[in-house]
Amino acid sequence: MNIYYDSANHRLVFVKDKADSRFWESHWDTYKIHQIIRPAVFSRSVLSPTGKYLPKGSRILEGGCGQAQYVWALHSKGYEAYGVDYARETVERIKNMIPEIKISYGDVRDLDFSDNFFDGYWSLGVIEHFYDGFEDIASEMKRVIRPGGYLFLTFPCISGFREKKIKEGKYDIWQESPELTSNFYQFALSSENVESEFIKNGFELVAKKKNAGFKGMKDEIEPGRLKQTMQNMFNSKNYLIKGLKWGFDQVLSPYFGHMQLLILKNSK
């Protein structure tokens, strides 16, 4: 993965593989869907924020739901949960294996739902994969969320540590070319810029929090013994190691957080 700094837009550009539907179909091991979905009912990262702002029975969409583990988690906890994704084969496999959850093939830039249909909308690491910007996605979010409803939005962000690296010139400068853009994977976006865009689009910022500090530190520190140790911990399936990673996340996220969570209210 190569990372560049786009000074004109104050964002990082990650180049490796184009994150289109074919990429995700090959990336997800859909034959292990049950192993991924069932444990998601214990996921505090999605269920806790949802429960704070929306009562059980609320109608919630996950746009770009992937393997639908969080759609399942919300469904299992008593929400009327829907999922949409543009990886058609994955959607069909999940529908065949777990027919009780509501997922469908679709495009988050052109949703097949009526205005004000949802009480809430989860977008987990989606907007950063669109090279031409997320304006169409934000417009559809605004349209389908009812007035007073909530948007839960996560995306890779420019952490304090990444900001420091930018100032020190640690990243190559982005210079757009057909070769690079054809292999565009994602952006790490300025949290302030994203907040501003959604506020201009009629949302009110309710809360925000940085997450994934362990990953943010692991990915950005110089190669060496510490980086390798963190990578080994990151890959571990051991529950004790997972507990340690969770603890490190709480300590590291304010400065190293890889992901930003914004909770926004549709104020129209």
Image (spheres, grey):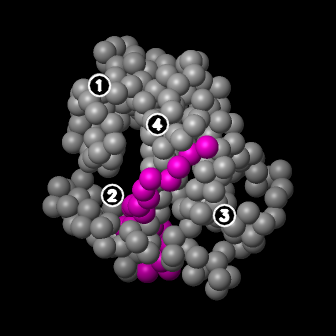
**Could you give the CA–CA distance between mark 2 and mark 4, rounded to whole angstroms?**
40 Å
- The residue indicated by pointer 3 is 11
Which residue type does callout 3 highlight? Arg
113 drawn magenta: no
- From what the image shows, is residue 24 above or below residue 76? below
Instruction: Look at mark 1 in the image and give the residue it sits on.
Output: 57
Q: Are marks 2 and 4 in contact (CB under 8 Å)?
A: no
- Type of amino acid under label 4: Gly
User: Could you tell me if residue 72 is visible in this image?
Assistant: no
Q: Which mark is nearer the camera, 1 or 3?
A: 1
Q: Residue 79 placed where, x, y %?
A: 30, 27
Q: Callout 2: helix, strand or loop?
A: helix
The answer to whether residue 54 of the structure is visible from this angle is yes
Q: Secondary structure at mark 1?
A: loop
Question: In front of the other: label 4 or label 3?
Answer: 4
Q: How far is mark 4 from mark 1, CA to CA? A: 16 Å
Q: Amino acid at mark 1?
A: Gly
The residue furthest bottom is 168
Q: Is residue 223 magenta?
A: yes
| Stretch of the chain drawn in magenta | 202-224
Q: Residues within 10 Å of mark 2 (few under 14, many from 20)?
A: few
Name which of mark 2 and mark 4 comes first in the sequence: 4
Label 2 vs label 4, nearer the camera? 4
Report crowding for label 4: few under 14, some 14 to 19, many 20 or more residues within 10 A (C-alpha): some
Q: Which amino acid type is shown beneath numbered disc 2?
A: Asn
Q: Position of residue 180 (x, y in %)?
A: 76, 55
Reading the chain from its start, which is encountered first: label 4 or label 3?
A: 3
